[in-house]
Image (cartoon, rainbow, N blue to C red):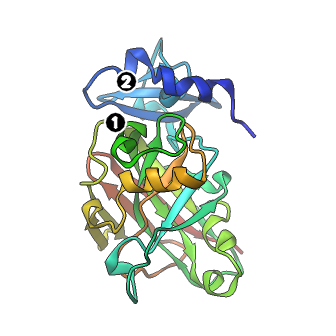
């Protein structure tokens, strides 16, 4: 487990230099010459950070053009909490009396332009466009009225879902959390209202999904408070919105894009394993 003293301190630090400002900031994680680093994106220039921004990372003084690096998933969580059936348009019946939670392995996460790979034995792999919040500090039994203070920023996600496994398995771990199934990115953006953001999903350029986070049955503030009753959330952990509407199958050669207002476009090709 990679939980460290940094995460304990992050709730107190939350980066004096970077997060004390009321202005929105954009953060990325990137690979250059085989080394993965964190950075603050300013225009088209990345300013390298000493650590993840939600752990108090500060500028090293080194910069690089965004075009010269490969963006990775802008997160490195321990806990990835997803929400099932959180948009009325995705339901076939009445809403549940409480949020439907499930957890997927953190190593199922990939970044922008990385392929989502359909396993050879899955024949019904779907897209799910979602918004994601990144936790900014230690959250345990958070009162609803304080929940926003625990949200560091917002990013976009595609929860790839093997519907054939989802209906057949005892739990959704394999169907929702297999390697490469969960794409995240391209950046984390702070100071957005997570409960009023447009989400759009496009298959091969054609709009297939579109709603606002204001349509969530349980909004992000509620989710932070609710989840923290049962689990301790730490800086960098993720909470997904759930998806909207009817989803459809993707096949090898497809490309799916998720655009979250204020965050940008997360694009991933789909590959079929042999």
Please tell me which residue lies in front, 218 or 117: 218
Which residue is painted at 55% across and 42% down in the image?
140
Which residue is painted at 46% across and 68% down in the image?
99
Q: Which residue does the numbered mark 1 point to in the structure image?
A: 190
Q: Residue 124: image x %, image y %?
A: 57, 84
Which residue is painted at 46% across and 31% down in the image?
68
Q: Residue 182: image x %, image y %?
A: 55, 59
Q: Which mark is residue 133?
A: none
- From the viewer's perspective, is 36 left or right of 113? right
Quarter of the figure with the C terminus: bottom right
- From the viewer's perspective, is 130 left or right of 114? left
Q: Residue 106: image x %, image y %?
A: 64, 51
Q: Secondary structure at mark 2?
A: helix
Which residue is painted at 58% across and 68% down in the image?
271
- From the viewer's perspective, is 88 left or right of 170? left
**Callout 2 environment at 10 Å: few (<14), some (14 to 19), or many (20+)?**
some
Confirm whether residue 114 shows in the render. no
User: How many numbered discs sit on the rendered protein?
Assistant: 2
Q: Secondary structure at mark 1?
A: loop
122 w.r.t. 198: above or below: below
| Quarter assignment of residue 51 | top right
93 w.r.t. 131: above or below: below
Is label 1 in contact with label 2 (beta carbons under 8 Å)?
yes
């Amino acid at each position: 487990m990679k939980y460290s003293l940094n995460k304990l301190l992050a709730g107190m630090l939350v980066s004096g230099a970077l997060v004390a400002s009321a202005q929105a900031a954009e953060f990325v994680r990137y690979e250059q010459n085989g080394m993965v680093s964190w950075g603050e994106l300013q225009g088209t220039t990345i300013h390298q950070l000493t650590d993840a921004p939600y752990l108090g990372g500060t500028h090293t003084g080194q910069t690089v053009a965004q075009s010269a690096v490969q963006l990775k998933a802008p997160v490195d969580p321990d806990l990835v909490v997803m929400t099932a059936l959180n948009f009325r348009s995705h339901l076939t019946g009445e809403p549940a009396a409480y949020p439907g939670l499930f957890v997927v392995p953190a190593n199922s996460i990939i970044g922008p332009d990385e392929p989502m790979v359909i396993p050879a034995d899955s024949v019904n792999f779907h897209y799910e466009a979602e918004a994601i919040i990144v936790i900014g500090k230690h959250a345990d039994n958070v009162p609803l009225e304080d929940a926003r203070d625990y949200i560091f920023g917002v990013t976009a996600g595609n929860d790839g879902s093997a519907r054939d496994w989802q209906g057949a398995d005892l739990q959704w771990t394999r169907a929702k959390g297999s390697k490469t199934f969960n794409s995240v990115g391209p950046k984390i953006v702070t100071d957005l209202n997570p409960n009023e953001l447009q989400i759009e999903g496009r298959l091969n350029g054609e709009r297939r999904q579109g709603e606002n986070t204001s349509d969530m049955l349980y909004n992000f503030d509620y989710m932070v408070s609710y989840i923290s009753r049962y689990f301790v959330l730490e800086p960098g952990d993720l909470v997904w919105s759930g998806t909207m509407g009817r989803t459809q199958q993707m096949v090898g050669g497809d490309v799916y894009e998720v655009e979250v207002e204020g965050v940008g476009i997360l694009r991933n090709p789909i590959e079929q394993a042999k």
